[in-house]
Amino acid sequence: MDLEIAKYIVNYYHKFFNEKENIASRHLNSLFKLNGESQSSPRYKIYKRKGWITTDKEALELLKNGETEFLLNTAQRIVKEHKDEIFLNYCPNCQKLARTPKAKQCRHCQHKWFD
């Protein structure tokens, strides 16, 4: 599975995350928003207090090899367990992945397939 498909699945089918993947994803998003702020910053402390930054060892274990590996592993698990519920929306003209599962216009070739 390539990274584009993994990101698509993680973005649009996050309802299939298990508890630890959800914690790990929230942790990643929070670190991104903190943009390298120190652990002593007030904002970092708020994120930690609210549980957006985690100390959960299992969740952090999912992130040990980086964001890309986490995305690929999570997407592969979701596809394996929910194959019939995942819709990869490919453009009928150029066969590239559309931006969203409900998109009706290709971002690559601008082809439209409205009803």
Image (spheres, rainbow, N blue to C red):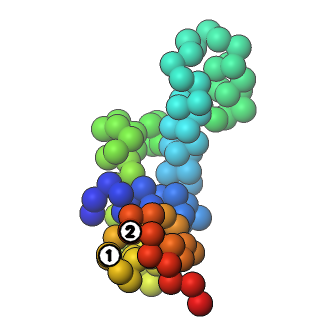
Q: Nearer the viewer, residue 112 or 37?
A: 112
**Residue to which mark 1 is pinned:** 94
Q: Is residue 71 visible?
A: yes
> Tag on residue 109?
2
Classify mark 1: helix, strand or loop: loop
Left or right of 105: which side holds 46? right
The three-letter code of the residue at mark 2 reads: Cys
To which quarter of the image does residue 47 belong?
top right
Residue drawn at x 27%, y 63% as measured from the top left = 1
Residue drawn at x 47%, y 58% as measured from the top left = 10
Q: How packed is label 2: few (under 14 Cα within 10 Å), some, or many (20 or more)? A: few
**Decide: marks 1, 2 in contact (CB < 8 A)?**
yes
The answer to whether 39 is drawn above or below residue 96 in the figure is above
Left or right of 28: which side holds 94? left
Q: Nearer the viewer, residue 62 or 26?
A: 26
Q: Nearer the viewer, residue 63 or 106?
A: 106
> Disc 1 or 2, which lies upstream in sequence?
1
To which quarter of the image does residue 41 belong?
top right
